[in-house]
Image (tube, rainbow, N blue to C red):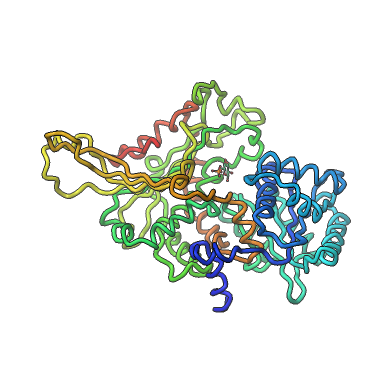
Amino acid sequence: MNDDREAQVQRGNPLRSAVDKRLPRIAGPSGLVIFGVTGDLARKKLLPAVYDLASRGLLPAGFALVGFGRRDWSKEEFQDYVREAVQARARTEFDQNVWDRLADGMHFVTGAFDDDAAFDALASTLAEADRRQGVHGNWAFYLSVPPERFAGVVHQLDRCGMAKPAEGQWRRVIIEKPFGHDLASAQELNKVVNTVFPEHAVFRIDHYLGKETVQNILALRFSNQLFEPIWNANFIDHVQITMAEDIGLGGRAGYYDGIGAARDVIQNHLIQLLALVAMEEPTSFSPRQLRAEKLKVLRATSPTGPFSETTARGQYTAGLQGSVPVVGLREEEGFDPDSKTETFAACTLEINSRRWAGVPFYLRTGKRLGRRVTEIALVFKRPPYQPFYPDQTNLLTNNAVVIRVQPDEGVLMRFGSKVPGVGLEVRDVNMDFSYSEAFTEQSPEAYERLILDALLDESSLFPTNSEVERSWEILDPILEYWDEHGEPDEYEAGTWGPASADRMLEKDGRTWRRP
Ligand code: BG6
């Protein structure tokens, strides 16, 4: 990327909010083609996000939305389907004028992914939209399809000439995870995609990076003087990164069986969070600088062994979610009762750098846990000396900075304070910043942000092929160990995972937070 382009990206960067607010970032002439448009993700997230962008005035006039799928739908039937998805899930209120403009630019092409004629029809539809709607040949192709379909779709786009832009146009591909199953398959996929689309035209979605609170990690660390001096092994005892869900597999058994919690969440979302928390300060937030720093810290990251003690995995059994009885994993519809796929995974990572040597990073994720929460807790060391009587500090634990990604987005600081009274008793108190109280503006949904960024060619929030491959390199040894050794433990739905997860920290004299 040349310096002009980099400067342009800087101007559009979220962290330059003063500029952002005055000059809203509106996409230029463009269109979005969604493969897998009848799937869950498209219905629940992508289509509502496109509407929300339209309703915030961030899409160009004549924006084209093209669905591709096996249904034998007319344009009107596709519009009805999108409208239903939008009315059910969009963040902004339904506005007939916004809808009419968006609906006008919609098209649907019927076909399967191996159907040459359907892709030829798609190419004609795009050419027609270029002429009639002023899309100018600027197309983003969103692959919301299982990874085994990527290669087929990408080759079809190539075959029909849709992957290659003419002079002054662009073509981009947006890819949903899971990006591979392990390092070898991810490398293979990258190779396939990169033979057709150059790396700068590939946008790999990790929707966690589109979340406001995740971007706030950068703001918190690098816009303040308060935190960075103590953000290292001299002061921090350990870091806990938790992504807990209260939902079970629901109708997703087919996708999830054989993938499991570590591949589904640790390989992407949690390792990305670790990278943002642990990386060095980039010289700017341009895609090149930001991704270089993330990759550097990931290269210094490795799993800590022995895995029998430093990792844990489990499957939920029947239990109570709140007060509602729920079935166990093996009773979920569509799930192979003999499957070893884990719904809870935890591991310990270390970062071999001056900043982080000796500081364990504990990562955990799971379905059917106590509550839905994603947070990063930096737990500080105890002061080397405390001039109190032991009974005055009984209720004092380690200081902590907790970045709450969701829900109740915000940042919490835990420190000791004197209990009112005649004695000098000290105990934990919380200082709590909450987004919803501090700001009146509602945060955009992650997919709004990421779709818009892809249309604007802003790639900072999209992991590169090297980051994806490095994340597999970190995780693969654990997955191989699990494959070869035993079975997942059990944990009751509504609890915080298997006992082995607690033992993981107990052996280090620590405990998991109960958020
Ligand atoms: C997805 C996982 O990436 O993230 C799902 O595949 C998970 O299993 C989802 O439920 C959670 O996303 P969020 O944004 O609700 O935390």
- Asked whether residue 268 appears in the rendered view, the answer is no
Towards the viewer: 56 or 169: 56
- Asked whether residue 330 appears in the rendered view, the answer is yes
The residue positioned 48% from the left and 69% from the top of the image is 289
Name the quadrant containing residue 184: bottom right
Name the quadrant containing residue 469: bottom right
Question: Residue 324 location in percent, x, y?
Answer: 53, 22
Identify whether 68 is placed above or below 136.
Answer: above
**Left or right side of 222 for 200:** right
Question: Residue 119 location in percent, x, y?
Answer: 84, 57
Quadrant field for ligand 1: top right
Identify whether 95 is placed above or below 282.
Answer: above
Identify whether 90 is placed above or below 357.
Answer: above
Question: Residue 80 location in percent, x, y?
Answer: 80, 42
Towards the viewer: 196 or 134: 134
**Left or right side of 262 for 143:** right
Towards the viewer: 422 or 424: 422
Q: Quadrant of the N terminus?
A: bottom right
**Left or right side of 483 for 58:** right
Question: Residue 500 location in percent, x, y?
Answer: 40, 34
Q: Quadrant of the C terminus?
A: top left
